[in-house]
Image (tube, rainbow, N blue to C red):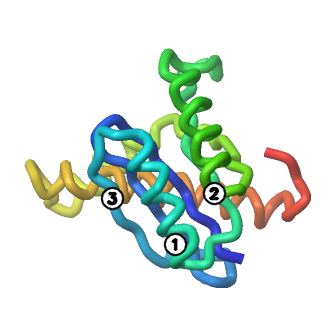
Amino acid sequence: MKIMAIDYGDARTGIAISDIMGSIVGSSTVIHSWNTEKTADEICRLTHENGVQRLVMGFPRNMDGTEGPRAELYREFAALVENKSGMKVRLWDERRSTIEAHQILSDNNYHGKKRKNTVDAVAASLILEGYLSYLRLHGEDSDV
């Protein structure tokens, strides 16, 4: 089963898609758009184009586990994607994903514009890796 992870952002949304077995990250990209409708439409296009069967979206939480200030915005976007795609969007704790993505890129000499254009795809890949690890440990039927 192919799974898509979404790292939603105002101007850039990172996308990572697993391989057909749902075991590793197979590809990643970034959607550049300030328009939520266009971003949701592009996610739907990528979902159909890549045969994605499950969606998981990073969800902002504070370090103490409470919901972050942007939580309601993310819930609304997830509902929009669900409505357009007909697929449930699972919300996944994304704490530290962007920080870790910046560290990975820094360690590999990605700086400036090169990093800015890549960090969201790396963050989506980290979200997907976390979700895939969870599935390996808890199984398909576990509720996240």
Residue 30 is tagged as 3
Q: Amino acid at mark 1?
A: Val
Residue 85: % across, % down: 63, 57
Foreground residue among 42 and 117:
42
Q: Give the mark nearer the N terminus: 2 vs 3.
A: 3
The residue lying at 54 percent from left, 78 percent from top is 50
Location of the N terminus by quadrant is bottom right
Q: Residue most toward the bottom? A: 20
Residue 120: % across, % down: 34, 51
Number of numbered callouts drawn: 3
Q: Give the mark nearer the N terminus: 1 vs 2.
A: 1
**Left or right: 125 as drawn, with respect to 121:** right
User: Tags 1 and 3 in contact by the CB under 8 Å rule?
Assistant: no
Rendering quarter of residue 118: bottom left
Q: Residues within 10 Å of mark 2 (few under 14, many from 20)?
A: some
**Residue denoted by label 2:** 85
Foreground residue among 90 and 95:
90
